[in-house]
Structures are given as structure tokens and as C-alpha cells.
Amino acid sequence: MTHTLIGTAGHVDHGKTTLIQALTGIDADRLKEEKKRGITIDLGYAFLPLPGGGVASIIDVPGHEKFIKNMLAGAGGIDLVLLVIAADDGVMPQTREHLNILHLLGAQEGIVVLTKCDLIDDDGWREMVREDIRETVAPTFLADAQIVEVSSHTGQGINELKELIINKINTGYTGHPAGDIVHQRGTTFTEPPAGSNVPCGISDRFRIPVDRVFSVEGFGTVVTGTLTEGTLKLGDALTVYPAIRAAKVRRIQVHGGDAEAAFAGQRVAVNLSGLRREEVNRGDVLAPPDTLCPTRMLDVKLIALPDTPREIKTGSRLHFHYGTHNVLCKAVLLGCESLKAGQECYAQLRFTEEVAVKQGDRFVVRFYSPMETVGGGVVLHVQPKKHRKGKAAEIERTLEIREQAGVSGDITARILQAIADEGPNFTPLEEIRERLGYGIIKTEGTEPPTEADVFTDAFTSLTRSNKITRIGAHHAIDETFRTQLAARLTRQLAAFHKDNPLQPGIRKEELRSRILPHIKTALFDAVLNIYEETQLIRVRETRVSLADFSVLYTPTQQQIRDDILDRIKKGGYTPPSPEELLAPWKKKNADFNQVLDALQTEGTLVTTEPGILFSSESIENAKTIFRTPKAESHAPVTLAQFRDALGTSRKFALSILEYFDRTGFTRKEGESRVLKQ
């Protein structure tokens, strides 16, 4: 069985309500004032029995420009549009406005109904009206729609129209299959795995924008609305958004009859327990607990109508229409100065009160004054940070990923979106997995649970295409952040090399404190591995440099280097002090200090204690001298014995032994040393 919501649209007094009565026998005008004035003021409802026992819901909307707000409250979630145009008037202002609204809301299927045909005998006029209609609907979802000529008074064409509606429903052009989990415009979802941690706005369960609220004696609060997605059952717990009030489903009626459950595409009346009449209003949304996140800001794709004379600028005040509600907001455009007819851009909307929407929801915006429909769009982010100037490119890239993800359920797009949402940060893979409701992440050589395969395959595909990069075993970054990090690394290393041309590189810990002080050393090492693999940098023990960097001495510095090494070598185990080494180069003091520091950093010279320097070759030879047969048997070696073996003074021998103790080559026992290794 398919559940379909049919909605009318069109200019005032073009016969929408009369057409519904001719199709169903039901007068959708329910208010005394509507009967008195002869025009529809608020939403009206009817239903059309279908062959085989099915029933299509019908919603009738007002056509007068003063009641566009009410029209918008009923326009969301319509599966099949009946665009009603009177043959004696043709296309009129609200015809165009209603058509624009439905197009913005993502309507996909419809029929053009030419009413009052009994009033027109002139075939030329009728043909001119049809041509005008074709021209009007050409850029919309009704471009290929059939035009059916009817008269609700004589019955002309009514049966033909009814057969066309039934045929469209039966052949699957429109509607929601019973029991499906659906989103607006019929996109089908798969439920997340049982027990998964589903955050706000991700769950694809029932949702009802409330369009009427009243009390029934003996039952209490009753609300009506269109079930735009999911399945509602007796006993279901729900929350009224955005106020976050809890209630329970006591009773369900569909088309005037009691039901155990209601499905997407149906008009429903829901009797709520635990909720007073004044605690729910038109414009509220009924959904399962913890599935919507009320917010005062949204990131959106904003689209200006192709024929609007108005211009949307940053700071423009707009009426934001979603579901059955409308809220005032201020637009902040991202990446453009203003939005003119036919243009689109990303924007942040900031509201005067909270709204409760999901990513992928469509909306309409009307100008604050005069109140005209100027555009609409799609929600991309329901809980964004407040955007500020200077980061437009980064923000647009993130929103582009969100737009691509849409509400399609594509796991690769959703992974990209989840990582992009974190901004310039390292996203824990376990967090992404849980957020999206998938199993554990596969690692090399392991066999994951079946529920993880989809996530793992998508994740692997993204890493192979370099859209995301895995950092170590537990984190990931997106392409944008990876590029930003590379630029940051390059800038820091280039600056360090410029200031320290004789240093082989910056210490890892110092580099971490400069660019990523908030992450731990192990994660930073994993980051460096990524850029070393791409040959951007070179990591040598505790030092990091640009991959193409090499130490270059000036002629004077080279002379100083050669002199220092020569005199240290000649000194053997009685080396000259730094002051003695400096003596010939006092006029080149800065160069001398740089060279001496470079020799120690690269390990050519070893400082056993402040003021005592040995060549690395002498230190290695001293280790060999210490390793006598006696020492190899772990017998103690005294300071005097080691001093005599080196042929030096007690001062230098003790300095080397204490260096050996610190570096783990020897261990002190009393006044002697034993070999530790």
C-alpha cells in the first residue's frame, strides 16, 4: 500500500476547494468565516478513497496573498500537487508564488488542473491560457505535467482527473510505501543498527509538524498534522519541539477512523497524554525523544527566486518558513556580498527564537517588509558555530561537503561530513563510527563484525582517494586540514632554518608546542610520519627539518669548524675548554657560538658536563677502553684505573664516567663503576 499526500495550489478564487469537493464529496472549508466570505482562509483537509482499499490524504491551501503564511504551513511534504488555474483568469500572481514555493520545497510530481472550463467557449482563449501555463511551469517540476480541463460544477473532466491521480499513485510516481522510513520528498533511509548512539538530527524516525491543536472532552489534547516521515504507533513516546515537552501517543486517527499506526504521507490526528492544550501550538514538531536539536542558528544553502525583485544582503531580516511554522531571522551571507534573483550561496541564518529542523530540510524565506516570497533553500547544519569573517573559504568547503552528503544516506559523504564538522581537528575514528551507527573499524589482519564492513569499505575508499587521512590507529583528518597542517609545518620549519641555518632541525617537542600544543606526543609523532612519507619533512631522532634542507657553512664558519675539531682531536682526553677554543675567534664570536652549537647538536661533539667537550669518536673509544675483560665480567672499575687507562687527569676521567652513568652505559657502585650493558 502507498500513502500519498495530495495538495492544492493556486490563486484565490480559482476553485481549489470546489475541485476537492467534486473529487471527494468533502467540503474542506471548515471555518464559519470561510463559509461566509466564500474563500479559504486556513488549511482544509479531505481524503480520496482509492481502488483496493487505500486512501490518499488531501490538503487544501488558501490562495489569497494575505494567507500565504497558512499556505506555507500546508505545503511541506506534498507528494502530488494539483496546481489549480481558472480558465477565465489564467496564470495569476499567487499562481506563480505558490509554484515558486512548491519548487523551493522540493515538490517533484504534479498535475495542472484548468478549472471553470464551463465558463469559456472561446477555444483561442483557452489555448492562449494553456500556452501561458506551459511557459510559466517550464523551469519547474511541472515542466512535463499534464493539463486536465475540468468543471467542478458540471463534472467535466473530474473522472479523468481522478483516474490520472490514481494512475500516478498506482504506478509509483509518488507517495510513500507503507512502513518505510522516509524523509521529505520520499528519500528512503535505512534504520541505524540497534543500540547505536544516534545524535541529534540523525535519526530518521517519525516527524509531524503540527497544524492544528484542540481539546476533546474526555480525551484531552489532540493535534493534527501530516506525518512527513517514519511510522507512528500507539504508545510511542514523543517530544514536542522546540520546547522539549514529553508526551505519549494515546490514540491515533487517520481519515476519521482509529488506527494502530500511521505512516509517512498520511494526515493524522494524535491524542496526546501528559500534555496540556496550551503546551503545544501550531508550528511545533512531534518527533521521538532526542532526535531533534532546537537551535537559534542554521547553516543553509540559500537560493533566490529567479523573478524576485528583492535583494538579500547580510543583515537582511527574513521570515523563515519550515514545516507549519515561521520565525524571524537575520541572514549572514557566506562568500558573497548580496543575493540577487536566480543566485545562490551559503548562508547562516540567526533566529529570534529556537527552531527544530533536520539537515536536508527545505524551507522558504519571505522578505520582512514588504512580505514577499524571495527564496528558500536547504538546511546543511543544525548546530553550527557562529561564523566570523576571515574563514570564508574554510566554512564554504565544510558546507560544500555537507551539501554533497545531503540526506542521501551515502556513508562516504556522511564520513566526510562528520570529519569536516570537527573543523581543523583530529577526529577520533571511534567517535565517527558511533555517531554514524556502524560497527568497529577494521585494522589490518583482523576480521570485523559484519555491521562494520560498510563503514570500513567507505573509510578505506576515502583514504585511498586522499579525501581523508588516517593519523595513527585512532584518528583521521580531512583533506582541508591536511593541507592546512602542511602549510603550517612548512612555515614553521622554514622560519627555524632561516634563524638557525647550522641546526639540522627543530626539536620535535618545540615544534609540537608551536603548531599543535593541544595534542599528545604520540599523536604528533603520527602526524610527522604522514608528512615524512610524502617527503615534505625529514625526522631524525628528536629533530625535524624540511626534507630538502641541509646545513651550509659560510667560509668563515667552515674555518672555525675545522679549527675546533682539529684542536679537540689533538687534545684527546685532555681537551681544550670552550674559552680556549674561542680565543682565536673572538672577533667572530657569533659565528663561533653557532658552529659550536651545531657540532653539539649533530653529535660530532659531546658535552659530558658544562665546559667539557669531547669528540664523539673519543667517547666511543673510551667505551671500548672501559670494556676490559675485567669490566665485561661486571667486576668494578675504579676511577683511578679508568684514569690511567685513558692517560688523562682525574677531572676528565670522572666527567666521562658520570656521563656514562647518565646515559646508561655504566652503573656506580660505591666509588667504582660496573658495566651496565
Image (tube, rainbow, N blue to C red):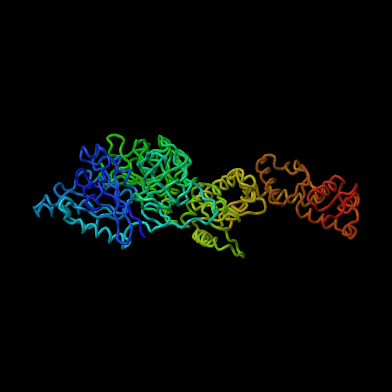
Which is more toward the observer, 344 or 52?
Answer: 52
Quadrant in the picture for residue 374: top left
**Who's the residue at 67% across and 53% down the image?**
541
Residue 574 in the image: x percent, y percent? Answer: 82, 48
Compare residues 82 and 559 and report the one nearer the observer. Answer: 82
Is residue 488 shown left or right of residue 219? right
Q: Can see residue 543?
A: yes
Residue lying at 52% horizontally and 57% vertically, measured from the top left: 193
Which one is nearer the viewer's eye here, 608 or 154? 154
Q: Quadrant of the C terminus?
A: bottom right
The image shows residue 507 at horizontal and vertical percentages of: 65, 47
Could you tell me which quadrant the N terminus lies in? bottom left
Q: Is residue 128 left or right of residue 501?
A: left
In this rendered view, identify the residue nearer to me: 326 or 387.
Answer: 326
Vertical arrangement, residue 457 with respect to residue 555, above or below:
below
The answer to whether residue 406 shows anywhere in this view is no
Q: Which residue is painted at 48% across and 53% down in the image? A: 416
The x and y percentages for residue 518 are: 60, 43
Q: Position of residue 64 (x, y in %)?
A: 23, 40
User: Quadrant of residue 367 in the image?
Assistant: top left
Seen in the picture, residue 276 relative to 555 is either above or below; the reply is: above
Which residue ends up furthest to the front in the rendered image?
218
Q: Is residue 156 left or right of residue 436?
A: left
What is the count of numbered marks?
A: 0
The answer to whether 653 appears left or right of 374 in the picture is right
